Amino acid sequence: MDEEYDVEFIEHEERSAKFLVRGITPAFANGIRRAMIADVSTLAIDEVRFIENSSVMFDEQIALRLGLVPLSTPPDEFDEDDVVTLSLDVSGPATAYSGDIVSSDEMVQPATDNVPIIELKDGQRLELEADAVLSTGKDHAKHQGGVSVGYRNLQRVEPVGDRGEFEDADAEIYRGVIDDDGELVDTAEFDNDITKRYPDQEVEVVDVPDAFVFNLETDGSMPVEELFVRAVESIDERAAELQDAVSL
C-alpha cells in the first residue's frame, strides 16, 4: 500500500501494547484486527509421536496441551511446507514444562518456559517427538499470534464552559484513551470518570475521525510490532490478489 499511516505507541511491552493509528477507516481498522488474529502465520506443534508415556494422561490429551504451547516464529524464515522437530524427555517425580522441550532449530523455541504440561510421579516417564508446522489462525486457534486484539475510536475532550456553582456533577464514565488538548491520556488515570479530570467544567467527548486506539496482546510467538506489520502486509497481499483477479 502506498498510503502513509501515523502510528504512536502509548504503552509498549514485548508481548502487549496500546497504540494509536491515524489515517485509517473503520473498515481498515477492523481488517487489521481480524488479520492479527487469523492471517499471520505462526509455528505450532501439529503431530506428536510418543516413545513412552507411563503417566496417567492419555496421549491425545498431552498432544493437545503441546499444540497450545506458543513457539517463537521468526519472520520470513519458514515456508508452509517446512517442519521443525521438537522433543521432550522427562522422568518423574517431576513436572514437565514447556521449557523442557528441545528444538532442532535454535530459532524456534517455546515462547514461555513455565507452561506446565503434566506432573509425573515416581517411576513415570514422558518421552516424545513432535513436528511443528506453519499455519494461520483461520486454520486453527493454536496458530493465533494475537490472543487479545481490540480497538476503539480515539475520543477528544472539548471543554464547553464552566459548571454551575451549585450544580452536582454526575459521573461520566469513558474507557480507553482520550485526546486531551493534544495529550494522549488513559482514562484509568482518573478512574474513567471525566468529571474528576474536569471537576469545574462542562465537556463534550467526540470521536476523532479515522483515528483508532488498538489494544494488543500476543502469545509470545513474535513481538507486537512484528504481528502488526505482518497483519497489514497480509491485507496488502490479498488486496493485490483481488486487483489482479479483477483486471483479468
Image (cartoon, rainbow, N blue to C red):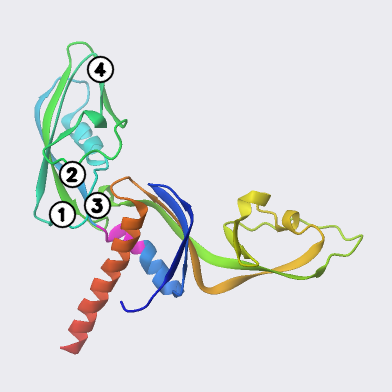
Give left or right: position of 20 versus 188. left
Query: What numbered label is drawn on residue 107?
Result: 2
Packing grade of label 1 (10 A; few <14, some 14-19, many >=20) is: few
SS type, badge 3: loop
Query: Quick one: label 1 or label 2, which is nearer the N terminus?
Result: 1
Discs 1, 3 touching: Cβ within 8 Å:
no
Residue positioned 33% across, 51% down in the render: 223
Q: Amino acid at mark 4?
A: Ala
Q: Select label 3 or label 4 by which is in front.
A: 4
Q: Residues within 10 Å of mark 4 (few under 14, many from 20)?
A: some
Do the numbered discs 1 and 2 sit on residues whose CB atoms are within 8 Å?
Answer: yes
The part of the chain drawn in magenta is 34-40
**Mark closer to the chain start, 3 or 2:** 2
Disc 4 to disc 2, C-alpha distance: 27 Å
**Type of residue at label 2?**
Met
User: What is the C-alpha distance between the residues marked 1 and 4?
Assistant: 35 Å
Q: Is residue 105 left or right of residue 229?
A: left
Q: Amino acid at mark 1?
A: Glu
Residue annotated with mark 1: 77
